[in-house]
Image (tube, coloured by chain):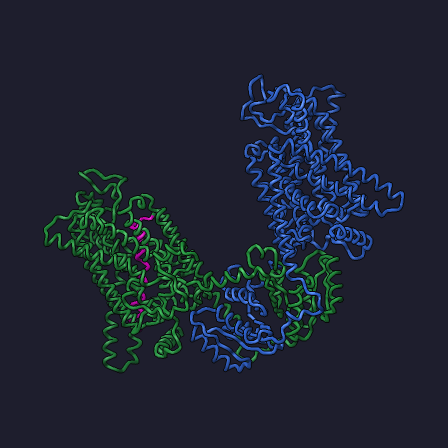
Chain colours: A green, B blue
Amino acid sequence: MSKLTDVPKRILIGRALRSDRLAETLLPKRIALPIFASDPLSSVAYAPGEVLLVLSVAGVSAYSFSPWIAVAVVVLMFTVVASYRQNVHAYPSGGGDYEVATTNLGPKAGLTVASALLVDYVLTVAVSIASGVENLGSAVPFVVEHKTLSAIVIIVLLTLMNLRGVRESGKLFAIPTYVFVAGVFIMIAWGAVRGLVLGDTMRAPTAGYTIHPEQGGLAGFALIFLLLRAFSSGCAALTGVEAISNGVPAFRKPKSKNAATTLALMGGLAVTMFCGIITLAMTTHVKMAENPATDLLSNGRPIGSGYTQNPVISQVAEAVFGKGSFLFVVLAAATALVLFLAANTAYNGFPLLGSILAQDRYLPRQLHTRGDRLAFSNGIVLLAGAATVLVYLYGADSTRLIQLYIVGVFVSFTLSQTGMVRHWNRHLLTEKDPAERRRMHRSRAINAFGAFFTGLVLAVVLLTKFTHGAWVALLGMVVFFVTMTAIRRHYDRVADEIAAEDTPDDDAVRPSRVHSLVLVSRVHKPTLRALNYAKLMRSDTLEAVSVDVDQADTRALRDEWERRGIEVPLKVLASPYREITRPITDYVKSLRRESPRDAVSVYIPEYVVGHWYEHLLHNQSALRLKGRLLFTPGVMVTSVPWQLDSSEAAKKRARKRAEWNAPGAVRRGPVAQPKKEKKEKKEKNEQQERAAVRK
Amino acid sequence: MSKLTDVPKRILIGRALRSDRLAETLLPKRIALPIFASDPLSSVAYAPGEVLLVLSVAGVSAYSFSPWIAVAVVVLMFTVVASYRQNVHAYPSGGGDYEVATTNLGPKAGLTVASALLVDYVLTVAVSIASGVENLGSAVPFVVEHKTLSAIVIIVLLTLMNLRGVRESGKLFAIPTYVFVAGVFIMIAWGAVRGLVLGDTMRAPTAGYTIHPEQGGLAGFALIFLLLRAFSSGCAALTGVEAISNGVPAFRKPKSKNAATTLALMGGLAVTMFCGIITLAMTTHVKMAENPATDLLSNGRPIGSGYTQNPVISQVAEAVFGKGSFLFVVLAAATALVLFLAANTAYNGFPLLGSILAQDRYLPRQLHTRGDRLAFSNGIVLLAGAATVLVYLYGADSTRLIQLYIVGVFVSFTLSQTGMVRHWNRHLLTEKDPAERRRMHRSRAINAFGAFFTGLVLAVVLLTKFTHGAWVALLGMVVFFVTMTAIRRHYDRVADEIAAEDTPDDDAVRPSRVHSLVLVSRVHKPTLRALNYAKLMRSDTLEAVSVDVDQADTRALRDEWERRGIEVPLKVLASPYREITRPITDYVKSLRRESPRDAVSVYIPEYVVGHWYEHLLHNQSALRLKGRLLFTPGVMVTSVPWQLDSSEAAKKRARKRAEWNAPGAVRRGPVAQPKKEKKEKKEKNEQQERAAVRK
């Protein structure tokens, strides 16, 4: 790889690691935090604004409810974090919500969670990038003026990066995340100092506007509904919290404890930032409207369609730091970057979840093995394609995309927490130690409250957002669910079909003798090699077979055969219609008819070439023939390769491909080493548990 | 196949023949004529018009030269027919111009002819369909109003027909061709009767117009140049004459004699029709202009862009039969149909020539075998794609497309006739029989005149048409020539690389022992079958190999292995990064390193599935692994298939595909039967001759 093409990659991601070094890359907390928390932390960049947006429907006066909504979000955040701290301790294997739901509630619940998470990954990409573009746009207007295009360009860039196989590198990931967190904290602190100590009046750029309430004078049920809708929007701050519970194996020891601490840290940061931004927004009189063109009034007149509504975080930064100031620009850039990193986490999480689903045969088997580039590529392209379609359809408008976002998250929260309650119930049946039982009771209480609260939020979200777009997310979940069920059913059917009978040796499939055939077109090195190899195998009979497509060629072949004194008998098959495949399959079938208990082994010399276009020139007949022969039971086909000089090129390419780094590798942690007996034992317990539940 | 979908096919082509019956389908002259002559006969539908079009540049007065040009075309036609009658006798094997040029002038000349013919096939499709649409349009105006679209739709229809594998059926091909020929003859006869006997004044629809000469008062060199250009356009009538010389093997015995008679018949018909139409056009005062919108004057004013200039044949038919009369409509329909059949001949000729070129390794080998659907499909799609591009670029304007057409034809005429002169020279060196020598001298004289005349025409065409579009055809020829040279060079390089050394047994490639490995993931029927087959082969060592991707699975596999008491040792390879391919290739390489003189045989259980999507769910790892293993020298890979129940579907599909009829089958004639000793001998002589020349 040239140095030049690496530069942007290194800037964003850091130097790629060879997979040999994967085992060394267990993550300390200070690195794990930015890797796993860029998604939930970055959501404070849009969640506060969404709350204000919804409230604006009832006019500026409704803004006074925003502290209460913030409190509700904070309580929810603490509940979810506390709940997931239980998950992390109970399931350190990294299966996350899918594992918890499957183990405790059965495969259907598990698959529902998986579908929800897959939809969630698509929306993480769409929402984070749309919001990132909006934040970048507050400093670089060009980007917002071509919002959809910019968002799609960034999706394409992320996709290419991940297809090429870059790896999340903790250290470089840490920088924008920490800059973002530090920036927000400085903003909150400086805002507090200016407001409380210096007594400055800080005014957001929209402070002078007024809002035309779409539904003025809301009261009673309608008001409550609006507040619930605002709360639902605020819940966007919780997306991505579950990421840490999927990543426990990547932590340094003690893994569960470190992961739990990181979770708490993340929750604390997110809550503080969320509340700080809401408070600053209220202090600086930020005005947000769902339809700014008509509902935002400047001197009593609608502001018109030319107006771009900047995100709350950027309006607040402008009020605190001053427009165009150094800190303002740094914060805008860090916000955008951290949002793009949040999108990138989906590129890592998607194949990770895919691999677990593949292990349970809901997705093609090859997704399970790490570093299967082709399989991962398909997943990445699927993810990027779906996100691009959403971004395009919704005009890269983060507000509209968020309506779809929260359903999936809370489906998995609710099912996961419900599963945890069951988990503790089961353990309490057998546990005798009173101290342990006390701990379990406490954990169960936390998870039960979590399940109740997240379930309530899910109901609220469905109720308040269904027509606003949540149905799209539900539809996506159904599609994933149905597809994965179909795949699983197919695998199960095949497994039944191929299950070995319970006799030590399956006599029905055991032939008694082998006839070997070597396909020959001319006498050259590949043919001679195939003949030699076939001879080595000492089958019962061995003959060379050629098809008489051209009489002169056949005569030449026969002459050469005699001249060289090759002792293998040469059989020439007539081909009145210049076909190759049919005479051979007919001959093989006739052999099988004559002695049905014997197997036929066909040796085909095959060229190994280096370039795709050479495939057009070689092996086509061989491949076709092989495809046809395999339909006949009792036949096996052996490729005897001949490496052409040009194959070196392909060999080099393949070697390069082998060094490819699968996305999600860091998040998954290294594969458990046989030495780590304890962890293995724990895993084994979990597996037995899971198996027990399934039965 | 359902009856319904067959109806249009049967109407156009007739019932498809099973290839078993191919041997019975030798063609009598009355059927061979329409099959091979639809191309040259149909060209009289546009050639006369092209002559008038060019002459119109100098004004209506220049039309008086048209009889002279007709005479020149007639002389040329007689020359070419007489020349090809020599070809047909000397080369009855059906290789056509390509064979003649290669044998007598060397491979470069042969390849030039082949390139010219390939371009010619593309243009046959484009010109015939464009002209067919124009003729159809004289009866159905809608078609001409959407000319390009109509032409492309017809190309697509023809392509689909040929991809599905219909076969030229002589009997149904005969009907439109004979209707067309009869229609033209009736028109000429009825026109003669009306004009000479009844003394009617027949006036073409354009008789009342005058022509604004683009270059008035031409004289001297400029006039001669214009006349030569008109003659070049008239030569379009000769395209396709060589088709019969490619089709000799399809004739009934005596093949050469029958082919020669058919050629003469075809020449006679074409000449009569050409002259008749020109004469009628003069009598009925047809006016054609290159740019009718500006140069055709009605009452002294340009006729404007709304005017559609109908082909000469339809204008004449209108004058003779009356517009909209039954005979007029029948002739228009027959003309269009015969032109579409002419286009279809290219679909048959292209794969035929491709097969011969593939035999000489200028094209991928698999094109040589008949009924290789995939290979033929690619050729058909290439042909249709190129024709569609031309039709689109030139707006389906037959006049502009014809500028490109004639170059290729005359390149192959000239080289073929030159080759024939050499052929006779060589034969005269050894021939003693005076009667035979006389015949040869006469033949040589004919071919020499043919070579001279066609060469002259080629020069004229290049001179007068180069800037009008002939350069496009030349460019196409160069592209084909370069591509085929590159393919041949590749095959030659590979042939050198794999050529067997001249020792009776090549010791360097002969290993001494075989280690067999059976890949195992779980114990099921496919695995057991693979194990049983591997045991049958009695290699020196045999072990089962599994990759430890999942510890629980591996443990289950080990337990099951022991429980069943399988005596083959099970080797488990560690895979710290959950890969499958790399641990196995590494293990195989380590075996090879330990004992470099031994071969390794890897058995892979493979699923045979019935639907494309099942491929996504099975065998992916196996295929990837196989691809990697083949790069390692000394390794052979055996697929042990397990036919899933669903594979029945694919089996049925494959069987249906096997009954597919390759285009060009009828034209090529059945494959020579071993009984026909005489013909074979003759062919052998030709082959020796050719070999001699190549040396």
Is residue A600 shown to the viewer in this render?
Answer: no
Q: Quadrant of residue A298?
A: top left
Residue at figure coordinates x 57%, y 39% from the top left: B390
Q: Is residue A55 left or right of residue A401?
A: left
Task: Identify whether A400 is placed above or below B588.
Answer: above
Q: Quadrant of residue B118?
A: top right
Task: Identify whether B420 is placed above or below B213.
Answer: below
How many marks can you see?
Answer: 0
Give the magenta part as a residue range: A396-423
Task: Identify whether B237 is placed above or below A214.
Answer: above
Q: Is residue A129 left or right of residue B433?
A: left
For this rendering, which residue is in front, B576 or A409?
Answer: B576
Name the residue at the right extreme: B434
Predominant secondary structure in magenta? helix
Which percent across, then down, holds residue A560?
Answer: 74, 64
Residue at figure coordinates x 39%, y 60% from the top left: A166
Which percent across, then down, holds residue A344?
Answer: 35, 58
For this rendering, which residue is in front, B448 or B662?
Answer: B448
Name the residue at the top extreme: B299
Q: Inspect the magenta stretch and tell me whether residue A397 lies in it.
A: yes
Is residue A682 shown to the viewer in this render?
Answer: yes
Which percent across, then down, holds residue B264?
Answer: 78, 37
Residue at figure coordinates x 80%, y 46% from the top left: B426
Q: Is residue A648 left or right of residue A688?
A: right
Which percent across, then down, holds residue A490?
Answer: 48, 65
For this rendering, which residue is in front, B372 or A62?
Answer: B372
Name the residue at the front extreme: A3
Q: Inspect the magenta stretch and tell me whether residue B551 lies in it.
A: no
